Image: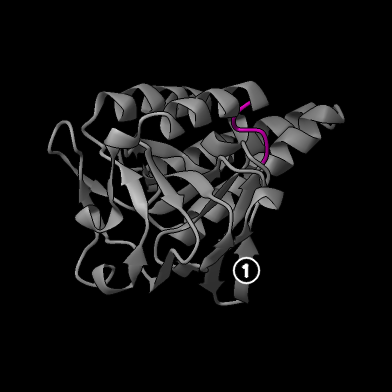
Amino acid sequence: MLIHIENVLTKESVASLRTALLGAEQAWVDGRVTAGHQGMPVKLNAQVDEHSQLARDCQRVVAAALERNPLFISAALPNTLYPPMFNRYEQGMKFGLHVDGGIRLHPHTGNKIRTDLSATLFLSEPDTYDGGELQIEDTYGTHSAKYAAGDMVLYPSTSLHEVTPVTRGVRLACFTWVQSMIRDDGNRRLLFEMDNAIQRLNATSADEAARRSLVGIYHNLLRKWGEV
């Protein structure tokens, strides 16, 4: 399940992050420092040192925005959010086909985080660079994401994906992973679709007893499948 989440960040927040990130060249490192065995040969980009003060400051902005976003909460049902990271692709840079590692260590606590969902939050407007599409493969084919600055794509971390070569401009983005309360992607999708249906029924003032029953079923399934 791929989900396009619009306006996670306001244009003002995006501009502030871009100014901070592009104005601190000393905080950028080779993106391969966090690549695993599979990603090392195919990864060519730069990323902000996740232990730097710049990273921590920018992480707080993104994490706070995600906590306020009802679509993200409904789709991800987050248990733990990996501290958001930031990368940059310039001309000739790319990240070849790979699957994200299943477990990551929290950079500040050392706790293990299971990566159920991957997310990319775009920080550059799509007309400012050529190439740089995030291409994600699933059972329905290959999907391409190159969204407006401030928009996010959320997708299962089990998906094979890549960032195509940038041929003009600079692609600046934020990326992160989520350990969901619902481990199984199919169960998580069912809950997301049920939540959407409940919200639509609420908006139309449909039968109150039916709505109450659906809400109860939703929470009973969450209780049955949830891991906290």
Q: Quadrant of residue 152?
A: top right
The dominant secondary structure in magenta is: loop
Q: Which residue is mark 1?
A: 143
Q: Residue furthest left?
A: 110
Q: Is residue 23 above or below residue 226?
A: above
Secondary-structure class at tag 1: strand
| Residue 163, x across and y down, in percent | 49, 64
> Going 38% across and 28% down the picture, which residue do you hit?
59
Between residue 86 and residue 140, name the one nearer to us. Answer: 86
Q: What range of the chain is rendered magenta?
A: 6-10
| Residue 108, x across and y down, in percent | 17, 31
| Residue 16, x across and y down, in percent | 53, 22
Q: Quadrant of residue 5?
A: top right
Between residue 104 and residue 226, name the one nearer to us. Answer: 104
Between residue 91 and residue 160, name the one nearer to us. Answer: 91
Quadrant of the image for the N terminus? bottom right
> Going 34% across and 46% down the picture, which residue do you hit?
47
- Left or right of residue 59: residue 107: left
> Going 55% across and 38% down the picture, which residue do you hit?
72
Is residue 44 in view from this perspective? yes
Quadrant of the image for the C terminus? top left
Residue type, mark 1 in image: His
Q: Quadrant of residue 49?
A: top left
Q: Is residue 24 above or below residue 28?
A: above
Q: Is residue 140 above or below residue 74?
A: below
Is residue 83 in view from this perspective? no
Residue 58 on the magenta segment: no
Q: 10 Å neighbourhood of mark 1: few (<14), some, or many (≥20)?
A: few
| Residue 78, x across and y down, in percent | 41, 38
> Going 63% across and 54% down the picture, which residue do you hit?
129
Count of labels in the image? 1
